[in-house]
Image (cartoon, helix red, strand yellow):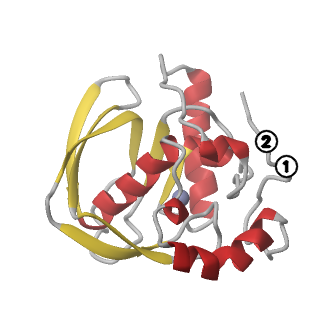
Amino acid sequence: MALLPVTLIGDKILKKKTNNVKEVDVKTIELIRDMFETMRNANGIGLAANQVGADKSIIVIDVSVIEGNEETKPIVFINPKLTHFSDKKVKIEEGCLSIPDVRAEIERPESVTVEYKDTEFKDQTLKADGVLARVIQHEYDHLQGILFTDLISDDLKKKLNKDIIKIKKRKVDFQYPVTESVDYQIA
Ligand code: ZN
């Protein structure tokens, strides 16, 4: 197991749609383990593969540290697809390990259905609401090359711009390993 550096806003791999996984081999399992370790070390509850520089459609989520979600087991989503959204939308404050210490309220559907493959490459379907639904949507966006800061108003973007520039220039006291170059990518 290894801690991987986390990619930051401005890094190229965060702006592109990730590739689908064709098979789960030893390297994939190793990547998933490293993603969990990297996420937990940074006190995160969700992580997408391109946040550790891997061009793969993989998400790991563990919301069990959030009050009321203690029973929710860690989940790995391979090649996830969101197939249904509730009409009801809710505003929840989001943060992101790739945009440390920046937070914003984002409106998204309250519940979603996600189809994905598990680590045995079997088809799975999950209907999620609450925190889990929120994290799934945030991480799914990562796999499409979308950050939550792409979803906020221009006014708020202007307000957050100074902080984002500091992150891009690595002029922040990072609490976990981060990438040194915008071109960082692992095999
Ligand atoms: Zn994020």
Identify the residue at image location x=39%, y=39%.
77
Q: Residue beneath label 2, please?
A: 184
Above or below, 167 against 34 in this view is below
Q: Is residue 135 left or right of residue 161?
A: left
Of the 4 image quadrants, the one containing the C terminus is top right
Point out the residue furthest to the bottom here.
159
In this orientation, which residue lies closer to the viewer: 89 or 53?
A: 89
Q: Position of residue 63 (x, y in %)?
A: 38, 63
The residue positioned farthest toward the left in the image shown: 87
Q: Position of residue 154 (x, y in %)?
A: 53, 72
Q: Is residue 1 visible?
A: no
Q: Residues within 10 Å of mark 2 (few under 14, many from 20)?
A: some
- SS at badge 1: loop
Across and down, in percent, residue 160 comes to: 63, 78
**Type of the residue with mark 1:** Ser
User: In the image, residue 171 lies at what x, y percent?
Assistant: 85, 73
Residue at (73%, 34%) from the top-left corner?
186
3D distance between C-alphas at marks 2 and 1: 6 Å
Q: Are marks 2 and 1 in contact (CB under 8 Å)?
A: yes
Q: Amino acid at mark 2?
A: Tyr
Q: Is residue 24 above or below residue 132?
A: above
Label 2 element class: loop
Residue 50: image tag: none
Does residue 75 appear in this view? yes
Q: Which residue is drawn at the image coordinates 62% and 49% (left, top)?
A: 51
For label 1, the residue is 181
**Is 1 or 148 nearer to us in this picture?**
148
* As drawn, 42 above or below 24: below
Quarter of the N terminus within the rendering: top right
* Image quarter of residue 66: bottom left
Q: Residue at x 49, y 34 (%)?
A: 57
